[in-house]
Amino acid sequence: MRPLRRRTGEGAAPAPDPLAPLLAEALSLAGQHEAAITAFPVLADRLAPVAAAHREHATALTKLVRTPEPSGSASPDPSASPSPPGGDAKGTLAALRGAEQKGLKSATQACQAAPAERAALLGSIAAARATHLEVVR
Amino acid sequence: MSPEVLAAALDAEHAAIFAYGPIGVRLDTASAGDARQAEAGHRARRDALVLRLTELGATPPPAAPSYTLPYPVTDRAAALKLATEVEERTAAVWRAALPETTEADRATALAALTDCAVRATRWRRRAGVSPATVPFPGRVA
């Protein structure tokens, strides 16, 4: 009996680009900061450059990701309908810090695993997320 | 992996260590503490690079006796500006090492890039520069 094996040749669906989750995360982070600014305009000075950076990261990642995400995929753009942050500004900032910390970890892992041609961009994204922790407080 | 990128990083670390001398004497007490910590961080990177290059059979480039500063560091504002630029320049060198490295060397380069980016942001905050962050640390415009 032949062993069952997933077909990887012609006809198989292309593997998702390993950067697709990082792109979704950049959009999600941008959306979370933008929602926080809407809820607490007093935070705009601090958070607007951070939100803009995540948007720029998403743009750069979109150019690299091999197959664009089909519409209606499992990870819709979270910035389209950002959930309003609950609680006060202090709690919102704490939640944003948690999201940045998680994002720093995933960008660091992505950079570590990346082929040479993606390493510099991913390194800058990881470093940027680390700097966000300095200002999102 | 070619030792040249690590030698370039070592050159940048030598220059950073030198620059923090004149920077430190122009800073207020709190900022001077940050400068001492930053200098210690660069010294640790330098020492690790010397070891790694030796391990790779390369000769680590020694520090120059002196480095030319881009402008005289005569006051706190100039010191904060130079400290920011030193971190930006060192970040760029480490970023350039990323595509040339793998595994432990890649991890070192990324940690160094991240440290430089965070320090640059702290110096911008001390200087009152807004925004204190840049979208792509280490990327040369």
Image (spheres, rainbow, N blue to C red):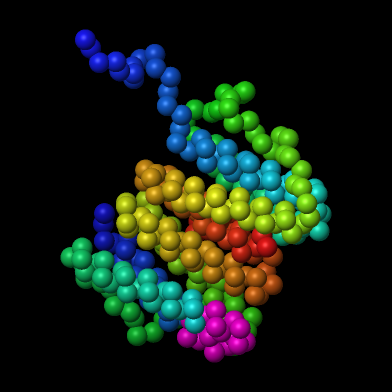
Residue A9 visible to an observer of this rendering: no
The residue that appears at 65% across and 75% down in the rendered structure is B126
A127 to A73, vertically: above or below: below
B7 to B68, vertically: above or below: above
B66 to A40, vertically: above or below: below
Q: Quadrant of residue B84?
A: bottom right
The residue that appears at 43% across and 82% down in the rendered structure is B18
B121 to A102, vertically: above or below: below
Furthest residue in direction left, as rendered: B57
| Residue in the foreground of this view, choosing between A55 and A21 | A21
> Which residues make up the magenta segment?
B20-35
Give the image location of residue B25, x and y in percent. 54, 89
Q: Is residue B23 magenta?
A: yes
| Residue in the foreground of this view, choosing between A103 and A14 | A103
Horizontal arrangement in the rendering, residue A36 relative to residue A109 (left or right): right
Furthest residue in direction top, as rendered: A1
Q: Is residue B95 magenta?
A: no
Give the image location of residue A49, x and y in percent. 68, 55
Quadrant where the image shows the N terminus of chain A: top left
Give the image location of residue B118, x and y in percent. 54, 65
The residue that appears at 28% across and 62% down in the rendered structure is B4
The residue that appears at 32% across and 58% down in the rendered structure is B105
Residue A72 visible to an observer of this rendering: yes
Main secondary structure found in the magenta portion: helix
Quadrant where the image shows the C terminus of chain A: bottom right
Q: How many marks?
A: 0
| Residue in the foreground of this view, choosing between B141 and B33 | B33
